[in-house]
Image: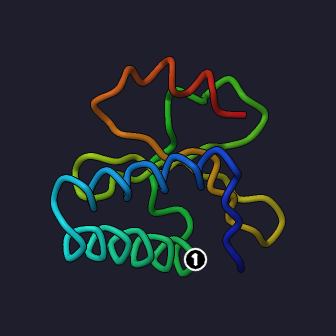
Amino acid sequence: MKAVWEPKAIEAKRQVAAYIRKEFGIKRAKLFRQEIDDTVSALLRTPNIGRIDPLFINRGKTYRSVIINGLNKLVYYIENDTLHIAAFWDTRREPKNQARQTK
């Protein structure tokens, strides 16, 4: 299995990492990136560990999500032998608006 990040998810992850680096320093930004890498690795080994996300229940795919570091949500779905990371956002933002922006 491989992981593929959707462009909007990549950009959102980049923005959060830049904010963390600016506000909390390089060490914390590296830890944030490592938390993401560890989460994606765990999903590749056991893709169904994320819970089915109710914000995406009426879509044609089964979207699952995991919370990273208590503040960020990673939304994904499995198709063929690929883990598609569809969205990444700060959990303090309005979730329904975030879900509408995710394809």
> How many numbered callouts?
1
Q: For numbered disc 1, what is the local secondary structure?
A: helix
Residue 95, compared with residue 39, is above or below; it is above
Residue positioned most to the front: 22
Q: Residue at x 32, y 36 (%)?
A: 91
| Residue at screen point 39% across, 78% down | 38
Left or right for 94, reference 78? left
* Colour mapping: rainbow
Farthest residue, direction right: 80
- Could you tell me residue 18's position as x and y percent? 37, 56
Return the x and y of residue 2 as percentages of the image width and height.
71, 77
Q: Amino acid at mark 1?
A: Leu
Mark 1, residue position = 44
**Where is the C terminus found, in terms of image quarters?**
top right
- Residue 39: which quarter of the image? bottom left
Query: In the picture, residue 47 is in which quadrant?
Result: bottom right
For the N terminus, which image quadrant? bottom right
